[in-house]
Image (cartoon, rainbow, N blue to C red):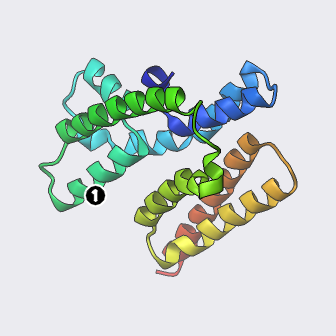
Amino acid sequence: MSATVHAGSSQIVAVEQFANASTVLGAAFAGAALNLRYIGIVASLSDVLAGLSLRAKLVAIHITGDENWALTMSERAKSKDIGASFLIGSGLVMICVWTVSTASGALVGTVLPDLERFGLGFAFTAAFIAMARGLWRGRPSILPWTVAFGLAITMVYLGLPKAYTIVASALCGLLASHLVRQIRSASQ
């Protein structure tokens, strides 16, 4: 699964869905909802992937994850020489390390104690917080982030399905972002 799906958060959500006796359709919906962000990620790569064959573009898209996308875009902001080879190279390293790590974790994990007791259950969340920090754009981000975060917290508190929470929070955050842009452009 790690080599073909290459989406850790989707894998975690799928396993949670299966553990809760959900259907394959529920797991697929949850994974798809969680990965809606890749529409924007892939769209932002159009300049990076320009000039590649369709096959090379599809490979690059498959091995693109949050981490190597963020690193590529950060490095590209410093130098336009950073392009597809950087994205693909970092993606290949990432998918190899990911596949070996998850396979090793599946084997070793059966003999380890509950890592939540040591506070290691937060590592996944911490990684996303670190990536989110890199996406912060200052004051214009306050309203969209607050709306998305507030809605997500409310929906989780109400016990609504996580897949719906992700979709609803993302859409409301996007709507708030759109409104902020409209207000800013109208005042200029």
Q: Position of residue 97 (x, y in %)?
A: 34, 34
Question: Can you give x and y, in whole percent of width and height, for residue 142 in the image?
Answer: 57, 74
Residue at the image position 15 percent from the left and 53 percent from the top: 80
Determine whether 184 is above or below 53 in the image: below
For disc 1, the neighbor class at 10 Å (few under 14, some 14 to 19, many from 20) is few
| Residue marked by disc 1 | 74
Q: Amino acid at mark 1?
A: Ser
Name which residue lies at 26% across and 39% down. 90
Mark 1 element type: helix
Against 128, residue 24 (above or below) is: above
Label tally: 1
Q: Is residue 164 above or below residue 74?
A: above
State whether residue 6 appears in this view. Answer: no
x and y, in percent, of residue 164 in the image: 75, 43
Residue 118 place in picture, x, y as percent: 59, 56
Of 181 and 77, nearer the camera is 77
Judged left or right of residue 132, residue 51 is: left
Identity of the residue furthest to the right in this view: 158
Q: Residue at x 30, y 52 (%)?
A: 71
